[in-house]
Amino acid sequence: MTESVPILLVEDNEDDVFFMRRALTAASISNPVFVAEDGQKAIAYLVGTASRVEGDNCPSLILLDLKLPVTKGLDVLAWLRQQPHLRGTVVLILTSSNEPSDIREAYRLGANSYLVKPTTTERLNELAKALKNFWLEFNSFAPGS
Amino acid sequence: MTGPPVFEERLLVLLPGRDAERTLQILSESKIDCVACHNLPALCDSIHQGAGAALLTEEAILADSDHCLENALRREPPWSNFPLIVLTQQTSGIRHLPASALLNVTLVERPVRFLTLRSVIDAALRHRRHQYEIRDTLLHLQQAQVDLKTANRDLEIRVDERTRKLQETISELEAFSYSVSHDLRAPLRSMQGYAHALLEDYGQQLDDQGRKFLAKISSGAARLDLLVQDILAYSRIAKGQITLENVSPGDIIRDVVETYPQLREKASVTIKPPLPTVSAHPAYLTQCVSNLLGNAVKFVAPGVQPQVTVWAEPDPANDHVRLCFEDNGIGLAPQHFKDIFEIFGRVNAGHLYEGTGIGLAIVRKAVERMGGTVGVTSELGKGSRFWLSLRRAA
Amino acid sequence: MSATSVILVVEDREDDIILLRKALSVAAVNNPLHFVRNGEEALAYLSGEGKYARRDEFPLPLLILLDLKLPGLSGFDVLAWIRQQEGIRALPVVVLTSSDQLSDVNRAYELGANSFFVKEFDFQNFVDVAKLLERYWLKMVKTPQSSRNNTSKPTRQD
């Protein structure tokens, strides 16, 4: 189940997209990665998944940046936690903000965990490995959610 | 309404027939302002309009079956005690006058000697004038109360305004931190990331020099990132909200050592108990300890294992506690004891030891905000003793 | 992250408690652990009732490890309750349970679990889980409680 589970990356900075894709590959994560450059596009993508066959192409892992154009990351999070088919989806906040208020609010709105974007490639690779170990291997997913 | 009535030094006179005319004439000639009233109700009206005193006969009062006079006097304000000068017959007694505490009565027996009457009238008018003065004092007091209420309300508005401005400042600070964090660090990630990617993918095609250049880009970005973080820490500590609580320095130090493996592995940190509880802000104190211990580990001569000893002693200057951090590092010369706590106040060659130059400025700011002081004593080559002086826990 | 931050473990089985303690220590997790044996006790701890009113002795936890199968109130009830309390709904809850029924996984996530692990029977599995918890939840992830003790990331250590 884990290899075909798509990862949705919601990120507007194209450099960060490049680095994350690279780190995921370096960690041998072969899941397809979809990128949405802003909140609206992410929502449109996720809305689209509701109509597809259950369990098919629906991301079980979403990496969500907070500072996005058009719609704020926290608003996307709030929205998706209200969609019945997305309530169990694992959402990891991945952002440059280390502000306690953002951290608290993200958990309050139902993020599964909160990660601060590392500033070095080494740390980013570590993070990708941890994502693989923790979320894609050991952690049990809500299937088809 | 234009204002309280002013004192009318006027005498109301209610006397029968010819007495009235003659009395009025004599009184006028003596420069007493007087006016005749035709009957008791008229006199009562005049009292209400403002007068100094009234001169009337006992018979007039006894004939007042409607209690007109009594009622008029009851209607007077609390400060008023209207003087009545009553001419009595020799044979009557005051027991015939209605007993009333309201009546401020001076009895003058007939036949009246003018001088007696005159002095009684003067006394009554003086008395009346005093009553007006009391009234004015009371009015001033009332006004003062109103002013006080207004001042209080204005003060509350100002406090609200200040609080609102403070919230604004805090929000601005948070917004500033937030923007700095996001907007400055994104390009740093790019710089570092692409230098690294270049090295990984095209490193083979470069010579040593080329690879070195890339390494410099990476390390420059890393250094700038540390600087940004330190600036953020400084601005948060300088302007952030602070709440003091009872903190155990021992716990904080153990936490810091736990959190940073470098400290655990490279250095030996010894705590000499007891470390008394202090009044501090946990996050700020953590930052201070982290910076002090980090410095102790960093600024050692090559090949020397960093050792730090921490203990507490009373501060000679006041009732504070001095937390001392003594290390075996490179030390500093006395002329630098002060500037080492300034922003960018580095006292050694930048290329020898890594650092942003803000670490100790952060420590000083944090301690000052907690109501304490910092200092250092040291000898070049022989280590340093940094101390934080903080209030004892309540 | 503060090493004095407590991890609250809600687990009733004696064997699992022992295994978990050992595994966490092997994984170098030095945080103080507080064990409660049932849902009611967990609610009391989190609401600060009775003896738990002393927050300096019983602080709000950094992380909650929650077993689903509990006597009395179930793990689901505890989870649902936590997510409804304004003051603590942001606390991360990692569900550790021996149940591997898929419906449990679904329901746990829908009720707001941050992550879900299935306990296998051998000790090595416990150690693996503990190591992952340490590496991910205690070192990498930012949680509301961990951010309380830090004004900024470490500036000197790498």
Image (cartoon, rainbow, N blue to C red):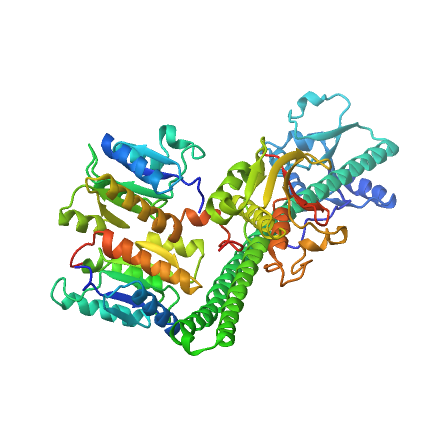
Which residue is at the front of the view, B172 or C62?
C62
Q: Is residue A9 found left or right of B299 in the rendered image? A: left
Image coordinates of residue B79 in percent, x first then y, are 68, 37
Q: How many marks?
A: 0
Of residues B361 and A118, the one drawn nearer to the viewer in this rendering: A118
Residue A24 in percent (x, y) is at 31, 65
- Image location (x, y in percent) of residue B286: 53, 46
The residue furthest bottom is B205
Question: Which sits in the foreground, B330 or B43?
Answer: B330
Residue in the picture at 71% in, 46% down: B378
Horizontally, residue C45 falls left or right of residue B307, namely left
Q: Residue furthest left?
A: A53
Is residue C39 visible from the viewing direction of this image? no
Residue B359 sits in quarter: bottom right
Residue B233 falls left or right of residue A134: right
Residue B365, compared with residue A48, is above or below; it is above
* Residue ID at (49%, 76%): B210
Report the residue at 67% width, 52% height from top: B3
Residue C122, position as x, y percentages in the image: 21, 40
Q: Quadrant of the C terminus of chain A?
A: bottom left
Residue B3 visible somewhere in the drawing: yes
Q: Is residue B155 above or below residue A68?
A: above
Q: Looking at this view, is B335 or B111 the one in front?
A: B335
Quarter occupied by the N terminus of chain A:
bottom left
